[in-house]
Every structure is written in structure tokens, then in C-alpha cells.
């Protein structure tokens, strides 16, 4: 059986979990700050806050950005629904804008058109997604966001290690928060760094960082925190806001630290797999997306677009190759349709959805397995 993605666990990873199990702290201990520091260093941000999962990361990010019942936020239909749901958790309103057909990323010009249809001040922020690992051009989004006084929350779940080079030759790593206000990641097993459940928010803004830490743990501030208003003794803490328990335990943070040591190796393997697919499908009926120079694609997914997607999906399953579809457009989910979106609203996303298939992409995919996947796909589409 060959899945579209899977985790890679080594003896070192297992030893890291056992080490933490034998330590005094299973949660809220030293491995949390250690993982946060290592992750911030990896993506190039100033701060990082570890949380229970990527969805929790999105939720407390929206809270820290002040999303409330009067907020209107723009995102892409081609993403995991949590990128939109986080706005709803805070009572805000989700607006979608269509994707660019060549990159399948939120189209900055479509976002501009949406902004221009409303009075200035209508919208609060944008949540672009580095879909499949293709880094969004945040320079363009930053210029637009500044023009309309919007924040940017980058959903970088697919793109740890990815980067793009801007027109001045500066390299921006996904999640480095050089252009976004905040960025978020997930450590779900299909993602680059797998801890079972887990997530991270990165930022360069100290004020947002403090809020994120508070919202992650019930809204409480403790001894030594300058936000503590009074101090009645060693036990004293204050609940200053309404937060959640979104903590990531030390067990999983230490697994994350161990996984992060292999992040570069894993990314290089993903890129080598992508190169072999690119070459195999060039000039065939399996359409691929080959990024231009300056784009350092992180390849969480490798997506092909074919005429008969259902046929190929079923054919591959009969050969024990479990491809997957990313994504059913979020605006076509019954929950969002009930809020007012409908078929035909975002034609590029809908057309993409009819043809897309994510084929196996993970660092432990062997050369033989990949050759088998390629020959079966070519056998079907020819
Ligand atoms: C995985 C993912 C999430 C949610 O992460 P969880 O850890 O599963 O909650 C959010 N956005 C995108 C784009 C994702 O791929």
C-alpha cells in the first residue's frame, strides 16, 4: 500500500519520547521552550508558540489579531477548512477570493477586486495559504494589506522550509513573519514534521507573542510576567482574558525537536521526488505545476491535474496506490453554503477541484515505489 503522505519515525525520535516520559515534566516543562526556540530558528522568526494542533494555532492567531463579530476576513477556497473556520470561531465573517490557475494560490488580484467592491475599512485581514508547499508571494499581499490596513495570517502548514525570493533579491522563508503578522504550522502526521498532534504560531511582534502565550493557556498570566497586575505571593496568577487549553505537551515537543533535526534532509528528499515526477509527466496528459526560479517549493503535496480524475483515483486504488484530493473547495462545504456561498462563485477553484489528484509524496517513498506510481499513472492517462 502506497499512501499519498506519511510520517517518518526513527529510533532517535522514539528515544526522545522515552527520555521525556522518564523526566519530571510530561507537559508545561522545558521541552516546550526548547522546541519553540529551535523552530523559530528553523523558519527565521523571532518568536514561536507551540500549541495543540494547527487549528488551535489558527484560532489563537485570530484571537490575538482581535477577530470578533464585526471582522471580515479573506481566504482561499483551496485549503483545509480550518483556515476559514478559525474566523468563525471568533464570530467573524469569511469571504473567499478565487485562486490563480497556474499556482492554485489565493490570487492577489482577486483579493484586490474584492476589497475595491467595498468601502475602505470593511475588511480586517487576509489568510493566504502556501498551498501544497508553494510559497505565497507575500510581498504582493503585504503591499495590498498596507494599502487597506489589513493584517496577514500566513497558513504555512504545507511549507516549512519553503521560501521565495522577492524582486529585490531578498529571500523570505515561509513563516519567518518578515511580511505576514503571524504564521502557523501543523505537526499532523502527513505534514513535514510529525508529532501526532501539534502546531506552532510564529511572529516577530512581541505584543502578539504575549497574547498568543496567554490564549494558549486559559488566558492566565503567572509570576514573573510583567502583565501580572498584582502579586499576592508565590501561588498567585491572574485570569486576564478568556483563553483555552491549547498546550502542546513536552512529550510531543521533544519528538518535534528530534524531527526538526531531519527537516532539511526531508525537504531535499521531497524536492528530489518532485523533480522525478516533473520529468516523468512533462509533455503528458498529467498536468503538473512547475514553479519558476526564485520559488523554493516545500512539496507537502505533489498535485497532478488530469481529465478523468475519478477514473485515475479508482485505478490507482486498484493498484494499492492511495492518492488523495486536496481540496474540496471550502465554499462548497454545506456549512459555508448555508452561510451564503454557492457553486459557480469561484470558477477557477471549482475547475481545479474537478481535476486535481495528490500523488504519493513523502521522504521515505522509495525510488522503486515512485517508478511504479509513475508507470501506473502514465499507463492510465496515455
Ligand atoms: C493540516 C492543516 C491545518 C490544520 O492543522 P491540524 O494540526 O490538523 O489542526 C490547517 N491548515 C492547513 C492548510 C493544513 O494543511
Image (cartoon, rainbow, N blue to C red):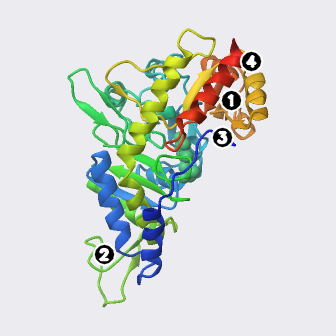
Is 129 situated above or below 65? above
Q: Residue at x 39, y 60 (%)?
A: 258
Q: Which residue is mark 1?
A: 341
Q: Which residue is mark 2?
A: 228
What secondary structure is found at the residue carrying circle 3? strand
Label 2 neighbourhood size at 10 Å, few (<14), some (14-19), many (20+)? some
Give how far across and how far down residue 231 sits, in percent: 29, 84
> Does residue 182 appear in the picture of this structure?
no
Label 4 neighbourhood size at 10 Å, few (<14), some (14-19), many (20+)? few
Say whether marks 3 and 1 touch (CB < 8 Å): no
Q: Earlier in the sequence, mark 4 or mark 3?
A: 3
Q: Residue at x 38, y 64 (%)?
A: 213
Residue sitting nearer the eye, 10 or 246 = 10
Q: Nearer the viewer, mark 3 or mark 1?
A: 3
233 sits to left or right of 158: left
Residue sitting nearer the eye, 143 or 263 = 263
* Quadrant the C terminus occupies: top right
Q: Earlier in the sequence, mark 3 or mark 2?
A: 3
Q: Which residue is mark 3?
A: 2
- C-alpha span from label 3 to label 1: 36 Å
Q: Earlier in the sequence, mark 3 or mark 1?
A: 3
> Does residue 2 appear in the picture of this structure?
yes
Amino acid at each position: 500500500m502506497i499512501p499519498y503522505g506519511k510520517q517518518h519515525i526513527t529510533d532517535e525520535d522514539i528515544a526522545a519520547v522515552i527520555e521525556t516520559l522518564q523526566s519530571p515534566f510530561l507537559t508545561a516543562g522545558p521541552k516546550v521552550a526548547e522546541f519553540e526556540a529551535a523552530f523559530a530558528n528553523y523558519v527565521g522568526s523571532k518568536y514561536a508558540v507551540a500549541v495543540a494542533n494547527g487549528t488551535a494555532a489558527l484560532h489563537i492567531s485570530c484571537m490575538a489579531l482581535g477577530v470578533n463579530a464585526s471582522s471580515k476576513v479573506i481566504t482561499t477556497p483551496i485549503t483545509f477548512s480550518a483556515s476559514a473556520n478559525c474566523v468563525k470561531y471568533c464570530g467573524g465573517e469569511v469571504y473567499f477570493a478565487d485562486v490563480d490557475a497556474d499556482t492554485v494560490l489565493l490570487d492577489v488580484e482577486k483579493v484586490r477586486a474584492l476589497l475595491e467592491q467595498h468601502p475602505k475599512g470593511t475588511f480586517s485581514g487576509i489568510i493566504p495559504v502556501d498551498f501544497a508547499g508553494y510559497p505565497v508571494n507575500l510581498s504582493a499581499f503585504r503591499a495590498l494589506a498596507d494599502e487597506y490596513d489589513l493584517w496577514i495570517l500566513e497558513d504555512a502548514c504545507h511549507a516549512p522550509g519553503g521560501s521565495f525570493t522577492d524582486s529585490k533579491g531578498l529571500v523570505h522563508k515561509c513563516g519567518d513573519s518578515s511580511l505576514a503578522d503571524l504564521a502557523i504550522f501543523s505537526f499532523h502526521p502527513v505534514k513535514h514534521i510529525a508529532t501526532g498532534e501539534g502546531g506552532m504560531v510564529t511572529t516577530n511582534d512581541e505584543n502578539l507573542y504575549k497574547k498568543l502565550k496567554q490564549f494558549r493557556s486559559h488566558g492566565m498570566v503567572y509570576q514573573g510576567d510583567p502583565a501580572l497586575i498584582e502579586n499576592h505571593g508565590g501561588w498567585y496568577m491572574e485570569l486576564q482574558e478568556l483563553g483555552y487549553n491549547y498546550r502542546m505537551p513536552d512529550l510531543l515537543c521533544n519528538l518535534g525537536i528530534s524531527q526538526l533535526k531531519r527537516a532539511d534532509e526531508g525537504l531535499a528528499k521531497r524536492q528530489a521526488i518532485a523533480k522525478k515526477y516533473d520529468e516523468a509527466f512533462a509533455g503528458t496528459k498529467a498536468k503538473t505545476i512547475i514553479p519558476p526560479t526564485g520559488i523554493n517549493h516545500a512539496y507537502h503535496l505533489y498535485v497532478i491535474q488530469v481529465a478523468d480524475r475519478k477514473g485515475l483515483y479508482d485505478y490507482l486504488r486498484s493498484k494499492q496506490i492511495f492518492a488523495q484530493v486536496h481540496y474540496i473547495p471550502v465554499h462548497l462545504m454545506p456549512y459555508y453554503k448555508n452561510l451564503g456561498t454557492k457553486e459557480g462563485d469561484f470558477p477557477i477553484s471549482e475547475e481545479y477541484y474537478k481535476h486535481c489528484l495528490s500523488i504519493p509524496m513523502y521522504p521515505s517513498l522509495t525510488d522503486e515505489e515512485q517508478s511504479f506510481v509513475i508507470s501506473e499513472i502514465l499507463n492510465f492517462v496515455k
